Amino acid sequence: MPEGGKDWNEISRLLSESGIKFTCFFTERKLHAIHLTAQNIEQGYKNIIVVSGDGTLNEVVNGVFTQNKYPTEEIALGMITVGTGNDWGRMYNIPRNYKEAISVLKTCKTVKQDIGVVQYFSSGMQERRYFINIAGLGFDAKVVNKTNRQKEKGRSGVLIYLINILTSLFKYKDVKAEIIIDGNKIEDEIFTVSLGIG
C-alpha cells in the first residue's frame, strides 16, 4: 500500500470498527506488491484487500498469478481506492468514500474477473504481465512510466498526468511492433495500443 499509506490510520480504524480482521503489509518499492502478494498467499492468505490505486492493484494481480499454492479462482480480491485513476474501482462502482467501500467489502459478494496477459521482450528477455483492466503499449506506456517516475519523487495527481500527456506528445516517436492476437500477426509501427477488459 504505497499511496494508501497517507490515509491508512483512518482506513485501518474503519476496517477494525467494521469487524474485518486483517494483517497489513506496506510496499516499499516498485513491484514489491507482486512479491508480497505471492508470499502471503503461499502462507495461506486467500482474501486480499488492496488499499491503493490501479498500479498497485496490477502488481497484486501479478502476485496472484505467480504463486502456486491455490488456484487463482480461490483468491478473492477487494479494493479500497485511494489512487489518482482508479479505473478498475470505477468499473465495479467501488465507492471512493472509505466507509462505503468497506460496507461493500462486508457483503462478501464476488464476481469472476477476466484476465489479460501480455508477453513482451525487455532488454532481450521475454516478460509476462497480467492485467484486469487496461494494458497500454507505446505512447500510453510512456506517459504512465513518466508519471510513475514523478510519483516516486512525490509529485502526483491529475494535473501531473495531463502535463505528461502534453509534453510526451511532442517527443514520442512511433515504435515498431509485432502483435499477435488469437494467432493473427500484425507488424507495423504503432503510436499506441490499448487492450481493455470490461
Image (cartoon, rainbow, N blue to C red):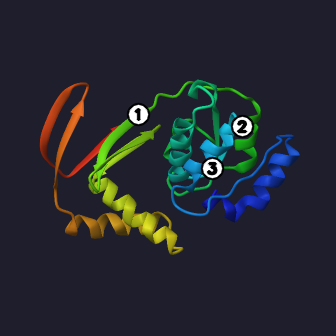
Residue 50 is tagged as none
Mark in front: 1 vs 2: 2
Q: Which residue is mark 2?
A: 45
**Observer-nearest of 22 and 11:** 22
Is residue 109 visible in the rendered image? The answer is yes
> Which residue is at 71% across, 37% downward?
45
User: Which quarter of the figure has residue 6?
Assistant: bottom right
Q: CA distance from mark 2 to mark 3?
A: 11 Å
Q: Which residue is mark 1?
A: 116
Q: Which residue is mark 3?
A: 36
- Give the SS element for disc 1: strand
In the rendering, at what x and y percent does residue 20 appear? 82, 40
User: Which quarter of the figure has residue 141?
Assistant: bottom left
Answer above or below: position of 195 versus 176. above
Which label's residue is closer to the chain start, 1 or 2?
A: 2
Q: CA distance from mark 1 to mark 2?
A: 23 Å
Which label's residue is closer to the chain start, 1 or 3?
A: 3
**Residue type at tag 3:** Leu
Q: Residues within 10 Å of mark 2 (few under 14, many from 20)?
A: some
- Give the SS element for disc 3: helix
Mark in front: 1 vs 3: 3
Left of 19 or right of it: where is 23?
left
Left of 110 or right of it: where is 178?
left
In the rendering, at what x and y percent does residue 55 appear? 50, 52
